[in-house]
Amino acid sequence: MPASPGALRFNTDSNKLELFDGNQWTEIVASSPDSQTGGARGLVVGSGPDGGGASNVIQYITISTTGNSIDFGDLITGRRQLGACASSTRGVFAGGYTPTILNSIEFVTISSTGNASSFGNLSQTRRCANGGLSNTTRGVFGGGYTPTRVNTIDYITIASTGNAQDFGDLSVVKERTSSCSSSTRGIFAGGITDPSSSINSIDFITISTLGNAADFGDLTTSQFYMGGCSSATRGLFGGGNNPGKTNLIDYITISTLGNAVNFGNLTVARDSVSACSSYVRGTWHGGRAPGAGSNIIDYVTIASIGNAIDFGDLYFGTDMHTACSNGHGGL
């Protein structure tokens, strides 16, 4: 029997209460921590100024506001093409290159400012390039380059420290993938596979289990170097290269299976962009637009569709970096 406006349901995929407004089910956010509503903090981490070098800079924004980024602290080791994930308290950064490829993992406490500390190591040296996602307890890093492309998926327990462990494999070997999550599912979208070809496929995992990724659907076009972010129900992938730089934003409903749908456009076409989110907003930072590191920050309202709006500027222009937040859809 079709639902009536005002009906309630508990979504067992996202573990959230939802209200039917007559057209669609919408998540009810009640008594949530500030990080999940107005006060989520996003961290933009690593890379270098204007496309050069491997930087240790960490900068932050408050996602519910607009304005320029602020200095947070420094990584132990400056790096490019690293992966990131976060709980409501910790941000974790893994792999990358200097240009030596790394396996080290570092972490910070997101609500404070300061320099990163050592966490442990990935199962292999690799650059993860935005291939990180998490729920409130577990962080997952998928794909990368070792210097050959891999389908490795590692996981960590964010609240602890120590080395990553084997989770399973992606459906194909790939790097420069984009990722996001709900509290139950992790998504890996696009990337470059062998022989050096961009792909449109989307994989998913169940974060609390172990095992190989399964097919979710396809992006609207083959892409790599996108930035991915999410609410508890919807995942967004913006920017990228296919092979030219693009301003496209795609979205999916994480609890279902199927192909992505066009959401709108970023303010500027660019690749090597990072993204993070609160439950309400997604933000994209930096990138190559068209040939150098950018300081642009864009934002959208995740539950809507439409083009991105200017948020402010990074104080340190960067590309091939990563981002995470303490209020994303996996928490």
Image (cartoon, grey):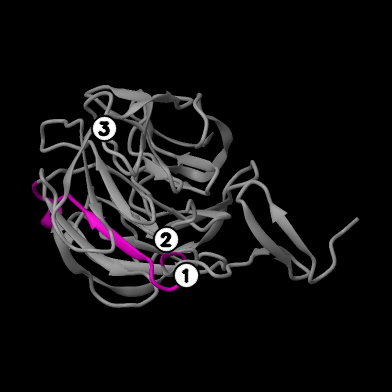
Which residue occupies the extreme right position in the image? 1
> Which residue corresponds to the image point at 79% horizontal and 71% vertical from the top-left?
6
| Within-10-Å neighbours for mark 3: few <14, some 14–19, many 20+ | some
Left or right of 192? Residue 75 is left
Q: Earlier in the sequence, mark 3 or mark 2?
A: 3
Q: Callout 3, which amino acid?
A: Gly
Residue 96 visible in this rendered orientation of the protein: yes
Q: Which residue is mark 2?
A: 327
Q: Which residue is mark 1?
A: 37
Q: Callout 1, which amino acid?
A: Thr
Q: Which residue is mark 3?
A: 162
> Which residue corresponds to the image point at 39% horizontal and 71% vertical from the top-left?
39
Disc 1 is placed on an element classified as loop
The range drawn in magenta is 35-53
| Within-10-Å neighbours for mark 1: few <14, some 14–19, many 20+ | some
Q: Earlier in the sequence, mark 1 or mark 3?
A: 1
The answer to which quarter of the image holds residue 118 is top left
In the rendered image, residue 179, in percent from the top left (x then y), is placed at: 42, 44
Disc 2 is placed on an element classified as loop
* CA distance separating discs 2 and 1: 7 Å
In the rendered image, residue 121, in percent from the top left (x then y), is placed at: 22, 30
In the rendered image, residue 143, in percent from the top left (x then y), is placed at: 36, 31
> Which residue corresponds to the image point at 49% horizontal and 41% vertical from the top-left?
186
Number of callouts: 3
